[in-house]
Amino acid sequence: MSETVTLTIDGKDISGIKGETIVQAAKRAGIYIPTLCDFDGVTSPGTCRVCTVKVDGRAAAACKTRVAEGAVVECDTPELNELRKMLIEMLFVEGNHFCPACEKSGNCDLQALAYRFAMMAPRFDYEFPDREIEARPKKLMIDRNRCVLCQRCVQSILTENDEPLFTVSNRGNKAIIEIDVKKADGIDDELAQKAMDICPVGAIIRKRKGFSEPIGTRKYDKTVIGSDIQG
Amino acid sequence: MSKKVVATTSLAGCFGCHMSLLDIDERILDLIELVEFNKSPIDDIKTFTKRCDIGLIEGGCCNTENVHVLKYFRENCDTLIAFGECAIMGGLPAMRNNVDLQECLAEAYLTGPTTRNANPKKIIPNDDEIPQILNRVVPCQEIVKIDYYLPGCPPRADLIWLAVSALVTGNPLELPYEVIKFD
Ligand code: SF4
Ligand code: SF4
C-alpha cells in the first residue's frame, strides 16, 4: 500500500501519496494550481514556473516538488497570483503572440491563463524577437514566434523507434526547438495531432487543419482554465 | 451632471474596433445620454474643440502621423484607453517588425503581384506631405502613457460598453470572463 502524507494548501488539509507532486495531490483534492508546461503530472519539464507556490514559506515549483508530511503550501494568495500573472505577461512579450492570426487561439493554454488572470495588457515592453518558422515538414510546422520553450514536445513526442522528433538547439534566449524533417515526414496523422495537442501554445501546428472550430465553440471561449479541477 | 466628453481615433488599425464600438447596438442611445463626442471619425470632428475626459485609441503607430495624433490625444484627454490588439501590441501590422523597411516598401510598390506590372517608373511614394513610415510598428504605450487597456480583435462590444460606462458613471467595473478575449 502506498504511504499517505497530510499537508495543507491554503489552510485546507489534504492527503497526498508519497512520491507524487503537489500539483497532483492538489488536483485530486479539487484544488487548481495553475500550470503551463506540466502535461501529465508525472514528468513535468518544470520550465515555465507558472505553478510556483510557497512551501513552508519558500517559493517552489509545485509540479516538481513532492508532497511531504506536514508541509504548509500557499497557492492562491494575492502575492503569488501577481507573480504568476507577471510570468505570463513575460511569456507574451518574449515571443510574437499575434493571437488574432493564431490557429491555436481559443484552445491555447497560455492565452487561457492570461484570461484567467484578466491580463488586459502586459506591463513589459514587447520585444518583437526575430524568430524563424520551420515549415518544411509536410504535416507540421513550428512557428517559433509562439514557442514558450516548455519542452513538452521534446519529452513526449517519440517516433516508432522511440526517437525524439523534437530537439532543443542553442541555449538561453537563443534556444530554439528543431524538428527532424525526414523523421517528421514519416509520422502518421495521429502522431502529428498528438504533437499539436501536446503543445500548450500554437507553436506546433498541423498543416491544412487550422481555424476549423468557430469562435464561441473553442475550449476556452466560455470555460475558465482550471475550472474542471476547481469550479 | 454635465456630459463627459469622449474622443476617438484610429491609427494603424482597420476600423474594426470602431465598428465594435457601434456594435453596442441600441445601447448607443444610452451612451449619448452619458457622453458627447468630440474629435472622432464617428462625427468627423477633425480637431479638438474642447478638453476631453476620455480618448479611445485604436491602432498602433506605423508612421509619423500616427505618433503626432497619439501625442495630440494625450495632450487633450484626461484618460487614454488603448482599445484593440493593434493599439496594445501593434497587432497584425506589427508582423512586419522583423522585416527590413526597404523590403516591405519594395514588396508593396515594386515586386508584389499587384504592383509588379503597374508601377513602370518604379516609384516608392516619398513626398514630404506623406507621413514617413516608421522602421517598426510601435505599441501606443511606448509613445505616451496609456491609462487603460481593452484587449480584443476587435474588443467585444460588451467590453467597450462596460468599461466606458463604468468610467463615465464611476460605478465599479465587473468584467465577465467572456468579454476579455485577444481575438
Ligand atoms: S500561441 Fe496562444 S498566446 Fe500565442 S498567439 Fe497563439 S493563441 Fe495567442
Ligand atoms: S513547440 Fe510547443 S511544446 Fe514544444 S517547446 Fe515550444 S511551446 Fe513547448
Image (tube, rainbow, N blue to C red):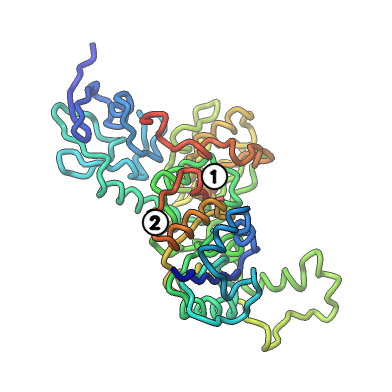
- Mark 1 touching mark 2, by CB under 8 A? no
- Please give the label number shown on residue B171: 2
Three-letter amino acid code of the residue under disc 1: Gly
- Marks 1 and 2 sit apart, C-alpha to C-alpha, by 38 Å
Residue furthest to the front? B1
> In front: mark 1 or mark 2?
2
Q: x and y percent of residue B161 in the render?
A: 52, 55
State the residue in front, A224 or A52.
A224
Provide the chain ID for the residue under circle 1. A
State the residue in front, A68 or B72.
B72
Residue furthest to the bottom? B128
- Asked where in the image residue A22 lies, by quadrant, the reply is top left
Q: x and y percent of residue A182 in the render?
A: 62, 39
Provide the chain ID for the residue under circle 2. B
Q: x and y percent of residue B13 in the render?
A: 62, 65
- Please give the label number shown on residue A202: 1
Is A158 situated left or right of A44 in this image? Answer: right
Q: Residue at x 47, y 46 (%)?
A: A111
Q: x and y percent of residue A186 in the render?
A: 63, 32
State the residue in front, A116 or B159.
B159
Q: Residue at x 51, y 31 (%)?
A: A158
**Mark 2 crowdedness (10 Å alpha carbons): few <14, some 14-19, many ≥20:** few
Residue furthest to the top? A1
Q: Is mark 1 within 8 Å of ligand 1?
A: yes
Let me know if marks 1 and 2 both belong to one chain. Answer: no
Is A27 situated left or right of B28 in this image? Answer: left
